[in-house]
Amino acid sequence: MPTTKRWNIEIHIGEEGSHTYAEARLHARDAAEVRGEGTARCNPSDENVPRIGDEIAVARALSDLAHKLLHEAAEELESVVRQPVHLRG
């Protein structure tokens, strides 16, 4: 059986007025915690559907987390190969 690793993402969602905030936290045993943040705002002329705001804020938080993780990996790779690295998302 191949060796597997488990990384967990914890997502926190909060609301304040017409704004929704989300934070995605990646927990990995062999790495420091990485966090991504995202927000969403309900247009005053739109019907307020909280689930949609949650989905948008979480998607943005996960996207931010992915970009930060890719940037971190590029920095670590540069320290190994000792030259600039450009990873694409």
Image (cartoon, grey):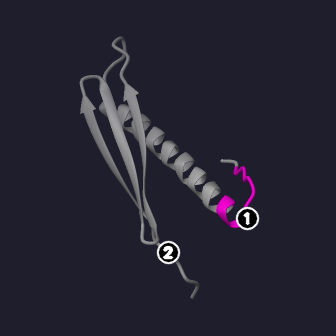
Q: Quadrant of residue 78?
A: bottom right
State the residue in front, 87 or 50: 87
**What residue is at 65 percent from the left and 47 percent from the top?**
89
Assess whether residue 80 is covered by the magenta stretch: yes
- Vertical position of residue 52 compared to residue 47: above or below: below
Instruction: Please name the predominant secondary structure of the magenta segment in the image.
Output: loop
* Amino acid found under the numbered disc labelled 2: Lys
Magenta-highlighted residues: 78-87
Name the secondary structure under disc 2. Answer: loop
Q: Neighbour class for label 1 at 10 Å: few (<14), some, many (≥20)?
A: few
Q: Work out which residue is located at the far top of the displayed protein and give it.
A: 45
Which disc number belongs to residue 81?
A: 1
Q: Earlier in the sequence, mark 2 or mark 1?
A: 2
Assess whether residue 89 is covered by the magenta stretch: no
**What residue is at 24 percent from the left and 23 percent from the top?**
17
- Asked if the residue under mark 1 is in contact with the one under mark 2, i.e. CB atoms within 8 Å, the reply is no
Q: Quadrant of residue 82?
A: bottom right
- In the picture provided, is 67 more to the left or to the right than 89? left
- Vertical position of residue 61 compared to residue 25: above or below: above
Q: Work out which residue is located at the far bottom of the displayed protein and give it.
A: 1
Image spot of residue 14 (x, y percent): 27, 38
Where the N terminus falls, by quadrant? Answer: bottom right
The alpha-carbon separation of the residues under discs 2 and 1 comes to: 25 Å
Residue under pointer 2: 5
* Amino acid found under the numbered disc labelled 1: Val
Q: Quadrant of residue 46?
A: top left
- In the picture provided, is 88 more to the left or to the right than 55? right
- In the picture provided, is 42 more to the left or to the right than 2? left
